[in-house]
Amino acid sequence: MPKAYWISTYRAINNPDALAAYSKLAGPALTAAGGRFLARSVAAHAMEHGLMQRTVIIEFPSVEAAKAAYDSPAYKQALAALGKDGVERDMRIVAGVE
């Protein structure tokens, strides 16, 4: 079974305080669910229509583990702290190559 990667790009950070509260809860929730943070910063370079956005990449043992992390009660608390309009982001789970 291939690993999976949770990739988030932040189009806008509307409430930095809510993002900080979210981060305090999300990091521990996702690592407890088997996630390993691989990258967490603004893009170092953007090419071919790319944008200089904050990007987070988290590795999970499988797609199922990544989805379960998103659906977990601990991560739901983090999302509640972020609020509906705290950020605008694109999130996806991508299966790794076997």
Image (cartoon, rainbow, N blue to C red):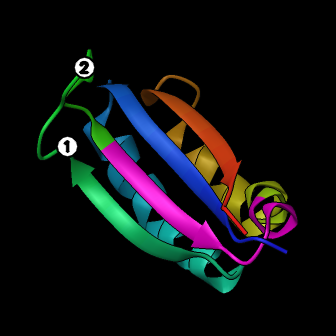
How packed is label 2: few (under 14 Cα within 10 Å), some, or many (20 or more)? few
Task: Say the numbered circle drawn on residue 8.
Answer: none
From the top left corner, tell me how far across and down residue 96 is, in percent: 66, 61
Q: Secondary structure at mark 1?
A: loop
Relative vertical location of residue 27 with respect to residue 22 in this rendering, above or below = below
Q: Amino acid at mark 2?
A: Glu
Q: Secondary structure at mark 2?
A: loop
Q: Residue at the location (52% across, 48% down)?
A: 7
What segment carries the magenta color? 55-66
Location of the N terminus (image quadrant): bottom right
Relative vertical location of residue 40 with respect to residue 85 in this rendering, above or below = below
Label 1 belongs to which residue?
Answer: 43
User: In whole angstroms, how far apart are the C-alphas of marks 1 and 2?
Assistant: 13 Å
Label 2 belongs to which residue?
Answer: 48
How packed is label 1: few (under 14 Cα within 10 Å), some, or many (20 or more)? some
Q: Residue at the location (18% across, 31% down)?
A: 46
Q: Earlier in the sequence, mark 1 or mark 2?
A: 1
Left or right: residue 51 compared with residue 26: left
- Based on the picture, tell me whether residue 56 belongs to the magenta stretch: yes
Residue 65 lies in quadrant: bottom right
Q: Amino acid at mark 1?
A: Ala
Left or right: residue 57 compared with residue 45: right
Residue 91 lies in quadrant: top right
